[in-house]
Image (tube, coloured by chain):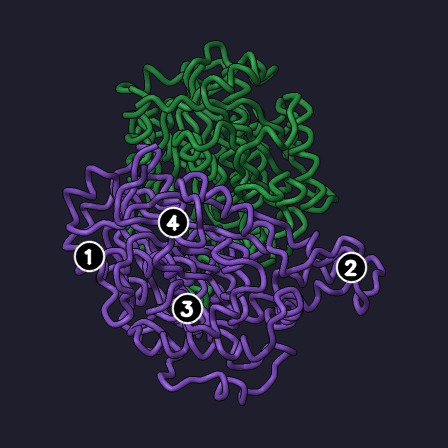
Chain colours: A purple, B green
Amino acid sequence: MRNVGIIGVGYTPVFVSKRKDVSIPEMISEAVDAAFDNTGLTPQDIDAITFGNMHTFEGVNMPHLWGAEHIRSLGKPVMRIATGGTTGMSAFQAGYYHVASGLHDVVMIVTYEKHSEGDAQVGLMGIITPEVMAMLASGIDVTGGKGMGAIGGGSAGGISYQAMSYLNHAGAGIEHIDGIAAMERRNAAKNPYAHLKDPNATAETIAKTPLVSYPIRFGHICPTTDGATVCIIASEEKAKELADKVAWVWAVSNCASDATTGNLIEGLITDPAEQMPCIIAARQAYERAGIKDPKTEFDVIEIYNGFAHQTLMFLEKLGVCEVGEAHKLLEAGELERDGRFPTNASGGVVSTNAIGTSALNRVTECALQIMGKADKRQVPDAKIALSSGFGGCWWSDLLMYGEKKPM
Amino acid sequence: MDINVAVAGFNMTPCSSDLVTTRERMTFELSSGLFDDLGITRDDVGTYIIATNDFLDGRTISNVFLDAPVGAYMKDESKVEMDGLNALMYACMRIMTGQYETALVLAFGLTGYQVSPYLHIDYIMDPTYDRQVKLLNELSAAALQARCYLDKFGYSEELLDEIAAKDLSNAALDPYQLRQLSDISKEKVKGSDYLYEPLRELHCYPPTDGGIVVLLASGEKAKELTDKPVWIKGMGQSIDPYYIGDRDLSVSPSTTQAAKRAYDMAGITDPKGQVDVAEISSLFACQEPLLAEALGLLDQGRAADVYASGDTAIDGKLPINPSGGPLGAHPICATGLLRMAEAVRQLRGEAEKNQVAKAETAVVHGQDGVCAQQNVVVVLGT
């Protein structure tokens, strides 16, 4: 397997609720141009492209076709990946395999979401509506336990079940979700590419936001964002030639679960806070990267957290700390940018969620940290980083990076 | 470049206009059937790639409920939302890295029972203009392409009848195809109604239900799993501009670019001489010679003579779509993989009534978008 390095990143100038000034392809091209500007590369340097977004949110099927010119892809291979929340990282992993397999040298990963063109909750309900319809058609009562899926299709309903279960396991309280949400809003204030920013957020101000579905408050929930992110990766030889600073990919891993077993069938309901795929993916990634002690080795961590409690939950699933320890680290300030476990220095998904980009932003933020290009959100001395993606049917994607080449 | 990945096996449904099944059940039957054929279990599969489309399935993240029935539960699975041949490429890359020995690819399309199979393409159309004006849809765009192609070389509409008659008579021999028309002839094709002039019903693909799973394996593993591995020799993909007004619809530059990549990897310098059989995703009769020209298998301007001479028939010099191609069945997303499966049957000598005389190297083509905007080419060999 060939070594792969991240050599460049491009964002749209802003990540906001509504970009009324640009169309979908125009918005994507802003991030593509930014990536070329930042790296000094031109479209001729790119051998292949992988592309990701969740197209049911905007109602345009296979938008890479519409954006063919805007992503400078004419005459090049383009592969479209879509896996729900994990899409950005799944597209990155597809790009990674393009290079690692030896087929291509320089690959650009393009992701976007323009939520203002559609309705994200309608899109999300589309996951489950056909199942509920099928249940109704076959005379199954969807109001009881078997109907869990009906609330699992939108976001907040199913996720509140997860949050409650997590708090019980971890011995944490709703105040800890307030606390982590406030930390991420403060971090977001230092990130020019974040959406919801509040430099003065505290657990108390978050606690004043209304409850949506206990224990989830409005302040714990991600926004719907318009934005695009581009990442350029290269083989070892090309990376050395094209870039001064490279974030090397140490390992990628992915593990899928199945929504059916998690949500729908009575008697088979698994705990949505269990997150077995994340545990398995972490084990594989650490093995591939030669990480012996995840509790000490990471300098930067970026976690996919559509909802604030997921930061704490996934830290435990990833083995960065023990079960029940994450909220204590939060209380001790260890998750802050200057703490022992700097987590989501970017503000996380909970502050910015253009779904197609969200998991890729975890990758690009870690890469910028390792390259030392994260400006105000820079974590000192970042050498090894870990990022996670989460989506669809409780599946997880993981990536690990280092300043040095993989062993 | 030595890819060293082979098709170890596949399992496909006979296509139908309504399979009367659920996606989950079909998926389970396809993958468990393949596992039984090969004598393996899901533990022997390293990674999974699924190719389905949310708009086609009418649901968001359409692979959400497929991981358990396909066997990907708690395994590495990803989704390529394109024609299945692209998913095959991705699976092949994953094996090429050495991280996995085997990869299973699943693709299906269930459009037989839908209100309109063309909705899938309608949602590709520009939402601001084309979708509002409603002049362009999959059929009208294909009709424009057909007209462009016929006029450019001065062919009559009878060329389309001839191509469709050849494909449909091949399809009638193939139990996997949906359209099983006995005693099909040029006259019968010409007797079908215009859908969009110059395209008649039998020049166009039928709305189809169908699915396929394919198991890829690295060199050593493939030889363990099967006596007849079929090797992936080359693969390539490329894309054309989006607006059909920006394109010359009588040619397909992206197919040519994709083919060049695949041929370079496979060491093919003279496609006409080196390729024994071609399976092309021509959704409309006009696309078959057009894409064959782009693949370097036909000379431009000679389609009328070549089809009249029978060179493209099963017993011809260069058989094109001996299976009947997508005019026989087109389960969107699975079509490229069905072409691959038909080519594998040819290369293994298992194509029965559709078998061509000599089959050592096959070219397989898949497409996405309006008028084949994006194309993928895979070269297979024994």
Q: Are marks 1 and 4 on the same chain?
A: yes
Kind of residue sitting beneath label 3 = Glu
Kind of residue sitting beneath label 1 = Phe
The secondary structure type at the circle numbered 2 is helix
Sequence-first disc among 2 and 1 = 1
Answer with the quarter of the image where residue B192 lies.
Answer: top right
Tell me which chain the residue with mark 3 is part of. Answer: A
Q: Position of residue B73 (x, y in %)?
A: 62, 43
The secondary structure type at the circle numbered 3 is loop
Tell me which chain the residue with mark 2 is part of. Answer: A
Sequence-first disc among 3 and 1 = 1
Distance of label 4 from label 3 (alpha carbons)? 21 Å
In the rendered structure, the answer to whether residue B105 lies left or right of residue A165 reads left
Q: Is residue B142 visible?
A: no
In the rendered structure, the answer to whether residue B266 lies left or right of residue B325 reads left
Q: Is residue B65 visible?
A: yes
Sequence-first disc among 3 and 2 = 2
Residue at image coords 54%, 52%: A278
Contact? badges 3 and 2 (CB < 8 Å): no
Q: Which residue is mark 3?
A: A334
The secondary structure type at the circle numbered 4 is strand
Sequence-first disc among 2 and 4 = 2
Distance of label 3 from label 2 (alpha carbons)? 47 Å
Residue at image coords 35%, 54%: A385
Is B50 located above or below residue A143 in the figure?
A: above
Q: Are marks 4 and 3 on the same chain?
A: yes
Q: Which residue is mark 2?
A: A135
Q: Position of residue A152 (x, y in %)?
A: 66, 65
Sequence-first disc among 4 and 3 = 3
Sequence-first disc among 1 and 4 = 1
Q: Of the residues tagged 3 and 1, which is closer to the observer?
A: 3
